[in-house]
Amino acid sequence: MSTVAVTGATGKTGRVVVADLLEQGYDVLAVDVSVGPVERAWADGLGLQLLRADLTDYGQAVDALSGAGSVVHLANIPAPGLRPAALTLTTNTAMNDNVFLAAAHNKLDRVVWASSETTLGLPFDVPPRYAPVDEDHYPHPTSTYALSKVLGETAAEHISGWSGIPFVALRLSNVHLVEDYARVPGYWSDPHARKWNLWGYVDARDVAQACRLALTAAVTGASSYVIAAADTIMDRPSAELLAEVFPEVRLTREIGTHETLLSVRRAREVLGYEPRYSWRDVLDQ
């Protein structure tokens, strides 16, 4: 297996992705802009090379990917509202463009990268057109963060066309670690509190699975997939939640009792993605 560069490697999701790739036998080059003693200790404990690089600089992006065969690009400002809106847009767009162009320059085999569920219209202050929401409910950015991901998907399409490199965008739902699940019961009393993403979430270990599968999936061009858990984060039936909070939104098909309203059907069919982890497995113990 060739070396996989993972950008944003020391972040919440990055660490889980790196651990999964190592477990599956990949050589990993960890890349991040934040490299202090804690990050160095983490990398040393895994026997990793940890490279500090500012991916808003194209030259550093080229250097960071020069020894890799493929890249899992997770580095970005991870949500709206963390930085000024314009800075979120310009920073994320610069990182995405530089990594994509550096991948083409270095003739990588594959680019897998973190897009976002927000490209589908989140937060759903305006109700979705239908549910379960799938890849066709795109593009509908409502923040500069979401717009940075839509621009990234557009750039990926064209750079893939120029270079012949397959680009796989993973439209990640709200990522949860195991320790985050202790907060889940606090969501249940008010179904409006998490209507913003149709009560969706995804376990970081399933994100890691999706990244790994995307590295070898039989795809060409630039393609995008919703990556979510199999269920919602609520203890009530999904159809009941939808009927109460979004009574005007139609269900396009019959759904399971607690089935996610962020469809992972395309990811299942094309990538072989099968969400394995749920908060129910943790809190029901």
Image: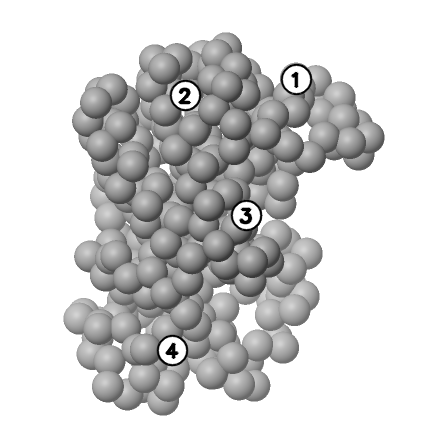
- Residue denoted by label 1: 49
Distance CA(mark 4)–CA(mark 1) = 43 Å
Establish if 59 lies above or below 182: above
Image quadrant assignment for residue 120: bottom left
Q: Which mark is residue 17?
A: none
Amino acid at circle 3: Ile
Q: Looking at the image, is mark 4 or mark 1 earlier in the sequence?
A: 1
Tag 4 and tag 2, C-beta contact below 8 Å: no
Query: Which residue is nearer to you in this view: 212 or 102?
Result: 102
- Residue denoted by label 3: 77
Query: Which residue is nearer to you in this view: 137 or 21?
Result: 137
Residue located at (41% from left, 70% from top): 123
Query: Which residue is nearer to you in this view: 161 or 272?
Result: 161
Distance CA(mark 1)–CA(mark 3) = 23 Å
Q: Looking at the image, is mark 3 or mark 2 earlier in the sequence?
A: 3
Q: Which mark is residue 125?
A: 4
Amino acid at circle 4: Asp
Q: Secondary structure at mark 4?
A: loop
Amino acid at circle 1: Gln
How many residues crowd mark 1 within 10 Å: few (<14), some (14–19), many (20+)?
some
Establish if 69 lies above or below 120: above
How many residues crowd mark 2 within 10 Å: few (<14), some (14–19), many (20+)?
many
Residue located at (19% from left, 27% from top): 161
Q: Quadrant of the C terminus?
A: bottom right
Amino acid at circle 2: Ala
Distance CA(mark 3)–CA(mark 2) = 19 Å
Distance CA(mark 3)–CA(mark 4) = 22 Å
Q: Is residue 95 visible?
A: yes
Q: Nearer the viewer, mark 2 or mark 1?
A: 2
Q: Looking at the image, is mark 4 or mark 2 earlier in the sequence?
A: 2
Q: Which mark is residue 102?
A: 2
